[in-house]
Image (cartoon, rainbow, N blue to C red):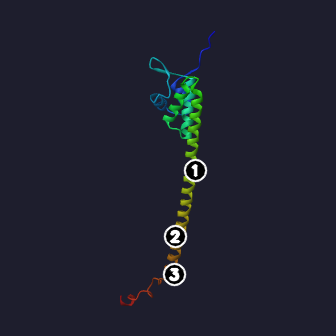
Amino acid sequence: MRQKKRTYSISELASEFDVTTRSIRFYEDQGLLKPDRKGQTRIYSSKDRVRLKLILRGKRLGFSLAESRELFDLWDETESGSERQLLKMLETLAQKQAQLEQQVKDIQMAKIELDSAQSRCQAALIELRQNKGAEEHDSPKTGQDSNPNASLH
């Protein structure tokens, strides 16, 4: 007896992966998912489910949809394409790792610049408060004694 393959509805996948059905349809429009249809209903296979999982993981890792599509296309090629697919995957992962390392450096530099700006602002605020305090101390007190025109009224 032939075992029936597990299939998924769009709402099941959306719920499982916490994405909108519109996102799943978008991935389909981009050629990343290829569900079967039964009338107007989309029927997603286990392969589509795995692809969706990989698309979402790829997005978190910084892969563009075009890069994901390219990797899927390589994967879909014949067995002889598997070495090529793995080499391409290694190349793409190395590029992504280099990009992430650069982003880390950029973030560290931005943090140093923010720390420096914060220190300058704190120093300026202290100086401003000290100058304001000195001005209040040096200024004459208000009242009749400090007003030279007070006796004229």
> Where residue 65 sits: x, y (%)?
49, 35
Q: Are marks 2 and 3 in contact (CB under 8 Å)?
A: no
As helix, strand or loop, the secondary structure at mark 1 comes to: helix
As helix, strand or loop, the secondary structure at mark 2 comes to: helix
Q: Nearer the viewer, residue 15 or 79?
A: 79
How many callouts does the rendering have?
3
Instruction: Determine the residue positioned at 41% across, 86% down.
Output: 147
Q: CA distance from mark 1 to mark 2?
A: 30 Å
Which residue is outermost to the bottom? 151
Amino acid tagged 1: Val
Amino acid tagged 2: Ala
> Where residue 131 sits: x, y (%)?
51, 77
The N terminus lies in which quarter of the figure? top right
The C terminus lies in which quarter of the figure? bottom left
**Sequence-wise first label, 1 or 2:** 1
Which residue has dot 2 on it?
124
Q: CA distance from mark 2 to mark 3?
A: 20 Å
Amino acid tagged 3: His
**Sequence-wise first label, 2 or 3:** 2
Q: CA distance from mark 3 to mark 1?
A: 49 Å
**Residue 104: numbered disc:** 1
Q: Quadrant of residue 18?
A: top right
- Badge nearest the viewer, 2 or 3: 2
Q: Nearer the viewer, residue 69 or 26?
A: 69
Which residue has dot 3 on it?
137
Which residue is outermost to the top? 1
